[in-house]
Image (cartoon, rainbow, N blue to C red):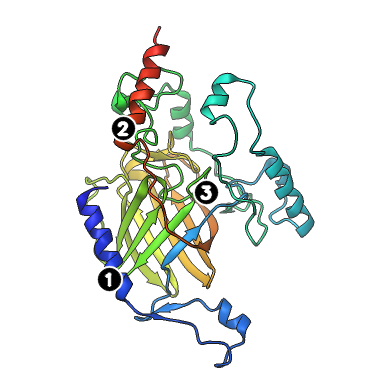
């Protein structure tokens, strides 16, 4: 973490620690216990209180499975069966007969942490628009790009099955530059599905466990950075719409791309636009929604909704190639694979 970012986070956390919270009225003061529990808390300066740690693990898939094509929601019985089957498929003792896969997937499922439940509304996909719960079709331009050989510079090439000559030749997550669940946008993944929010009257910090990403989002109405200034996490600006925090992000770098929850070949750069919405539904739930669009990649924008549950901390550091020791091993393996 850079000194600049560490200082910003420290300063924000220090301010937050002393900013007052206005709790919901206690039961008996015009509210029942049930109503008090469901009333979202507010900050001392009147905004919905988004602060805290939020767990966004879920077995609900991003896209609706083909076998559920015409079903938007599951019944209680269907939901229980879906969870049972999914957990069986992800049995922690499962091994792969293929030796290479066995190593790449850490020998079993012990390290993966998808959660053990689906969303409370029993929706069959996190995608809520389009109505079919699927990522929209690619544009003709994007289809052509996926068929053509990858022509990105060697410094940005994600090597799949080819030899890495240096650190620049491996993927961004292997280089610990971007995490696969931290976004933006934030999408549940194999592990490290924890988000922490810090909040002051004029800033919000979105801090994710994966690759220790932190976005400092100003709420003061300032304009986005000039288009020629790309950022690894994009350039985020926030504002309130009623009780919902809306975060608009532009200026993504073309060195990374987003394709339905994966960092890889997909929408990227100056044509990718992200709008996120954070709504404190009740004391225990934060609804996170995002809409992504890239007219050069998808035929239309699409939206996902992910309910996050409050959880206790602390968030431990995701070291990721501490001192780049792991990178030496990756490159040593690449030398062995060379013809």
Displayed quadrant of residue 15: bottom left
**Sequence order check, earlier mark of 2 and 3:** 3
Question: How far across and down, in percent of the image, does residue 62 sit?
Answer: 57, 47
When the figure is inspected, residue 222 is found, relative to residue 38, above or below; the finding is above
Q: From this view, report whether residue 34 is shown above or below residue 220.
A: below
Quadrant where the image shows the C terminus = top left
> Label 1, on which residue?
15
Picture layout, residue 208 above or below residue 154? below
Label 2 crowd (10 A; few <14 / some 14-19 / many >=20): few
* 94 left or right of 57 in image: right
Q: CA distance from mark 2 to mark 3?
A: 26 Å
Q: Is residue 337 rendered to the left or right of residue 177?
A: right
Q: Residue at x 44, y 42 (%)?
A: 180
Q: Position of residue 163 (x, y in %)?
A: 38, 17
Q: Who is closer to the viewer here, 298 or 66?
A: 66
Q: Residue furthest bottom?
A: 29
Mark 2 lies on residue: 324
Task: Point out which mark residue 188 bears.
Answer: 3
Disc 3 crowd, CA 10 A, few/some/many (<14, 14-19, 20+): many
Residue for point 62% across, 58% down: 119
Query: Is the residue marked by circle 1 packed among few (<14), some (14-19), or many (20+) residues within 10 Å?
Result: few
> Which sits earlier in the primary sequence, circle 1 or circle 3?
1
Query: Along the line of sight, which residue is nearer the eye, 242 or 332?
Result: 332
User: Contact (CB < 8 A) between labels 2 and 3?
Assistant: no
Secondary structure beneath disc 1?
helix
Give the number of the disc on residue 236: none
Helix, strand, or loop for circle 3? Answer: loop
Can residue 151 be seen here? The reply is: no
* Viewer-side label of 1, 3: 1
User: x%, y% of residue 70?
Assistant: 72, 49
Q: Real-space Cα distance between discs 1 and 3? A: 30 Å
């Amino acid at each position: 973490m850079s000194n600049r970012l560490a200082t910003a986070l420290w300063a924000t956390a220090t301010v937050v620690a002393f900013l007052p919270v206005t709790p919901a009225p206690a039961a008996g003061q015009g509210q029942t216990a049930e109503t008090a529990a469901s009333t979202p808390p507010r900050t001392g300066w009147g905004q919905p209180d988004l602060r805290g740690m939020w767990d966004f693990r879920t077995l609900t898939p991003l896209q609706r499975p083909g076998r559920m094509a015409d079903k938007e929601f599951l019944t209680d019985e269907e939901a229980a069966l879906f969870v049972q089957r999914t957990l069986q498929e992800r049995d922690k003792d499962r091994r792969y007969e293929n030796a290479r896969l066995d190593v790449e997937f850490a020998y079993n499922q012990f390290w993966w942490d998808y959660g053990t439940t689906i969303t409370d509304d029993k929706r069959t996909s996190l995608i809520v628009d389009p109505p079919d719960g699927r990522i929209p079709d690619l544009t003709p331009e994007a289809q052509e790009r996926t068929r053509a050989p990858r022509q990105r510079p060697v410094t940005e090439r994600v090597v799949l099955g080819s030899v890495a000559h240096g650190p620049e030749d491996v993927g961004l997550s292997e280089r610990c530059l971007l995490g696969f669940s931290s976004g933006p946008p934030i999408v549940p993944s194999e592990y490290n599905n924890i988000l922490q929010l810090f909040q002051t009257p004029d800033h919000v910090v979105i801090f994710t466990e994966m690759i220790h990403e932190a976005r400092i989002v100003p709420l003061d109405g300032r304009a986005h950075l000039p288009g020629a200034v790309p950022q690894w996490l994009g350039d985020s600006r926030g504002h309130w719409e009623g009780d919902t925090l809306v975060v608009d992000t532009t200026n993504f770098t073309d060195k990374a791309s987003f394709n339905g929850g994966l960092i890889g070949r997909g929408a990227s750069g100056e044509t990718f636009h992200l709008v996120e919405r954070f709504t404190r539904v009740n004391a225990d739930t934060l609804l996170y929604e995002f809409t992504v669009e890239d007219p050069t990649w998808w035929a239309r924008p699409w939206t996902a909704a992910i309910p996050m549950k409050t959880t206790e901390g602390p968030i431990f550091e995701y070291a990721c190639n501490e001192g780049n020791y792991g990178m030496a091993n990756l490159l040593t393996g690449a030398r062995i694979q060379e013809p």
